[in-house]
Amino acid sequence: MSINMDQLFEVPPGLRNVVVTETELGDVRGDEGFYHYRQYSAVELARTKTVEDVWFLMLEGRLPTAEERGRFVAEVAPLRVLPDEVREILPAVAAAGVAEKPLAGLRTALSVLAAARDLPPLWDADPARRKADAMLVCAVTPTILAALHRLRQGEQPLEPRDDLSAAANWLYLVTGNEPTAEQVAAIEAYLIATVDHGFNASTFTARVIASTGADVVSAVAGALGAFSGPLHGGAPDRALASLDEIGTPERADAWVRAKVAAGDRIMGFGHAVYRTDDPRSLMLREIAQGLGGELVDFAVTVERTVVDVLAELKPGRNLYANVEFYAGVVMERCGLPRSMFTPTFAVSRVIGWTANILEQAEDGKIIRPAARYVGPPPPAPID
Amino acid sequence: MSINMDQLFEVPPGLRNVVVTETELGDVRGDEGFYHYRQYSAVELARTKTVEDVWFLMLEGRLPTAEERGRFVAEVAPLRVLPDEVREILPAVAAAGVAEKPLAGLRTALSVLAAARDLPPLWDADPARRKADAMLVCAVTPTILAALHRLRQGEQPLEPRDDLSAAANWLYLVTGNEPTAEQVAAIEAYLIATVDHGFNASTFTARVIASTGADVVSAVAGALGAFSGPLHGGAPDRALASLDEIGTPERADAWVRAKVAAGDRIMGFGHAVYRTDDPRSLMLREIAQGLGGELVDFAVTVERTVVDVLAELKPGRNLYANVEFYAGVVMERCGLPRSMFTPTFAVSRVIGWTANILEQAEDGKIIRPAARYVGPPPPAPID
């Protein structure tokens, strides 16, 4: 039963460990608890650099000089402003109930942008144009997400401020308040640490779509869809919901045992790749402890309990807190409402998606695997 | 340089011939020039059945009885009507210039629909709900595409007619005229023949997104993005543009030689899987010849010339007319404007995408391959 004349390749389910492409963007080393962006430890970048530095790094392959940083910041600041076509349609989009679903709202607005601006297919665009479109999408994403959030609250969207960094501007656009330096540093670290993380399903989706030569927004829209999937991970509000459910530290033990007994997944723990501590989790715990507060202490206690109980009940599985667990705690302490946790993840990850899209566009080959037909043999007679 | 502790699998570039999944939906046999939907020759279905029959077949795994067909037609007819949230936003979407890009317009409107209706993730939905959402998306897709087209022309969208079949209703919604029986039969055959076709990049994209457990629209929106890519194929207007460029039959030979010499792709010829005549092309040629007219005669002459010249210039490559070549001719003869050629393809293919999405949802495992890092070794010191 041949699909074509060539040999078919058998691979593990879900393409697990199947090498789809080469990349210079980064690497996740699950057994070492280490990941990097273009050679630089992502956690070290998060501790020491700005979102704009890392954004430049992903695009250009090196960290910017002071002068390059200044030019880059000046270049992206005007791109944050909502394009008129998007600005005009957002109230109607919000009124249709779309703001309740921020990722679908972002997909809606970016689709309008792509069509209104007639974004060229990657296949037809030169590298400079591709990069310009990618930068526009990344710069306008926070503005769209924050505008939909405020419209949903019955408030007017705020204009982005070009005197604020990307991280500070994000907190300002969502909350309407100028954030403290401590909050900016915390969110900056979170955003940098979540820019990219290997070949997760949304990044892979973006590259599959980019491999057809479609435009940047088509690829980002697909990534947003994959990203919204419950199996993708990356929903920091779910972990916080678990903390709510547990309520008090002494209930943590019984809670996790009941979850495991019921066969439920425990949000915020375990990862497809890491077999040791998730380096993002370690950093975010430290940041959360720096911000301090009752919620943070509670989260630390719950983490310890859950890890211990999981080690007892599921020996050898090496289940640790993942990026979701402390992300929600950090975001809550920075004044972000829970509905904006996943959008905050999208604000940074879109930088990683577009870097992957640009890299895939250089490749120029379509990603087109095969399926094996396992139904009854054709042809069946038609009455 | 390990990504994790397990072995990495080397596969051909672009995942060519790599088996990602098993399917009961169909199979393309490139060396036999044959493809089928759930055992039934797709070309035979196209010659003898209705879109609704094949839609039912894709969903249920068997052709409907007369009674089942009646129930199914009655069930989908009301789903064609534009939901209020979409109806209200479409004029603003069209005004933003989105109607010039029908696939982005459809993605915009479906994203609004998904958010406004709060479509559940596949992961959370039971099979009946998944199927209902898939049917809604397929039923409303033609209405959205036709409405955007008419708004772009400065005309009011038409209400779908429940006394018309899916194929006839599509022609009516776009053209505003009740089509002839001959036109309906031709478009019906085209739509059926393009419902599904193996693991093309858009179908694969839909399944990757579905594998994360995201909602049906997230998966369809990603598929639309991949579908819009120039390397995906499926743009019947491009082949017709080639006919325009050639102009007269005697210029065909020189035109194709010039194209080949310049290294340009020749739209409407060659296919990733077929190494013999594309069975869709053979059927569509016959249908085009049944419709008759000068354009059809011209296309037949050009096809013969191009195939002969390609056989001479690229021996052993087996380049034949593909589904694009006669599709445009058939659609033009059915009164569809060129801007609606690709949308017509989307109207049928969304049935195939959603069938694939539903099948993937049954699987429940995420599709998550790997990339190999090939940049300089980390960690690099950060200044």
Image (spheres, coloured by chain):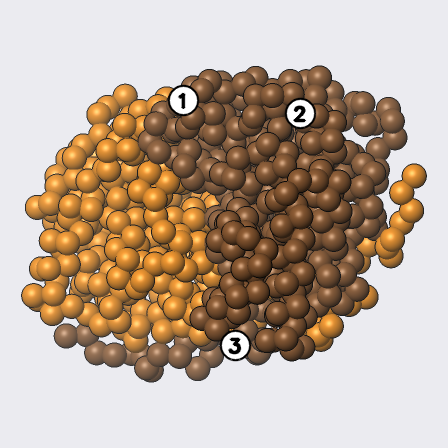
Chain colours: A orange, B brown
Q: Which residue, given by chain and number where applicable, does mark 1 sit on?
A: B154
Sequence order check, earlier mark of 3 and 1 = 3
Q: Viewed as shown, does residue A211 lie left or right of A258?
A: left
Left or right of A377 on screen, residue B27: left
Tell me which chain the residue with mark 1 is part of.
Answer: B
Tag 3, which chain?
A: B
Identity of the amino acid at label 1? Gly
- Within 10 Å of disc 2 (Cα), the crowding (few <14, some 14-19, many 20+) is some
Q: Does B150 appear above or below A37? A: above
Give residue A36's quadrant in the image.
Answer: bottom left
The x, y position of residue B282, in whole percent, is 74, 53
Q: Amino acid at mark 2?
A: Pro
Instruction: Name which residue lies at 67% across and 61% down.
Output: B304
Q: Nearer the viewer, mark 3 or mark 1?
A: 1
Identified by mark 3, the residue type is: Met
Residue B168 or A148: which is nearer the viewer?
Answer: B168
Cα–Cα span, label 3 and label 1: 60 Å
- Of A200 and B195, nearer the camera is B195
Q: Which residue is mark 3?
A: B5
Q: Is tag 2's residue or tag 3's residue first in the polypeptide sequence?
A: 3
Residue at the location (24% across, 33% down)? A84
Between discs 1 and 2, the one toward the N terminus: 1
Q: Note whether A204 is above or below B54 in the view shown.
A: below
Residue sitting at 61 percent across and 63 percent down? B306
Spatial CA distance of label 2 from label 3 is 62 Å
Whether labels 1 and 2 belong to a single chain: the reply is yes
- Residue pointed to by mark 2: B179
Q: Is residue A280 visible?
A: no
